[in-house]
């Protein structure tokens, strides 16, 4: 994925009502998840939330974890651990690539 594509995936484009429909959640839930630090949508100059495609994927993951029986604290921990694994895997890929050169 190019940096331009990655930037597009992070750019907020969906209003909260659209995002809620996309993930089959109530708008209130999205607000709670933001307050708990589980998702960080962009904001318009007027303060409206804008959710990115990456945020939508994260909301799907939150929904799935909740359906598996985790509470919000558990969801936060799993998301943090998944991010840590992603960072470490990327570090390993870079080290492997450096050693091949």
Image (cartoon, grey):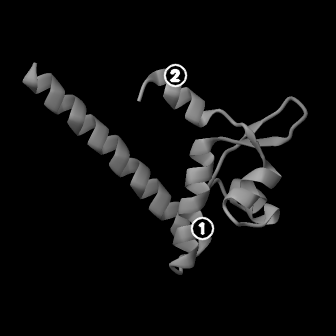
Q: Is residue 64 above or below residue 33?
A: below
Q: Residues within 10 Å of mark 2 (few under 14, many from 20)?
A: few
Q: Residue at x 28, y 43 (%)?
A: 89
Q: Return the disc, 2 or 1, that comes first in the chain's sequence.
A: 2
The picture quadrant where one finds residue 66 is bottom right
Q: Nearer the viewer, residue 66 or 8?
A: 8
Q: Residue furthest left?
A: 100
Specify whether residue 35 is in view: no
- Left or right: 4 in relation to 98: right
The alpha-carbon separation of the residues under discs 2 and 1 comes to 28 Å
Callout 2 secondary element: helix
Specify whether residue 80 is in view: yes
Q: Residues within 10 Å of mark 1 (few under 14, many from 20)?
A: some
Q: Residue furthest top?
A: 101
| Residue that carries the numbered disc 2 in the rendered image | 4
Badge number at residue 75: none
Q: Residue at x 69, y 57 (%)?
A: 22
The quadrant of the rendering that contains the N terminus is top left
Q: Is residue 36 above or below residue 100?
A: below
Numbered label tally? 2
Q: Nearer the viewer, residue 65 or 9?
A: 9
Q: Residue furthest right?
A: 46
The picture quadrant where one finds residue 100 is top left
Q: Residue at x 57, y 63 (%)?
A: 62
Callout 1 secondary element: helix
| Residue that carries the numbered disc 1 in the rendered image | 63
Q: Residue at x 79, y 43 (%)?
A: 49
**Residue 98 at x, y percent in the picture:** 15, 23
Q: Nearer the viewer, residue 71 or 24?
A: 24
**Residue 55 at x, y percent in the picture:** 62, 47
Contact between marks 2 and 1 (CB within 8 A): the answer is no
């Amino acid at each position: 994925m190019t940096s331009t594509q990655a930037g597009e995936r992070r750019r907020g484009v969906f209003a909260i009502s659209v995002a809620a429909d996309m993930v089959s959640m109530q708008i209130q839930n999205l607000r709670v998840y933001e307050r708990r630090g589980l998702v960080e949508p962009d904001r318009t100059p007027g303060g409206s939330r804008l959710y990115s495609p990456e945020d939508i994927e994260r909301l799907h993951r939150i929904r799935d974890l909740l359906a598996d029986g985790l509470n919000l604290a558990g969801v936060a921990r799993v998301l943090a651990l998944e991010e840590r694994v992603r960072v470490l895997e990327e570090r390993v890929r870079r080290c492997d690539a450096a050693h091949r050169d």
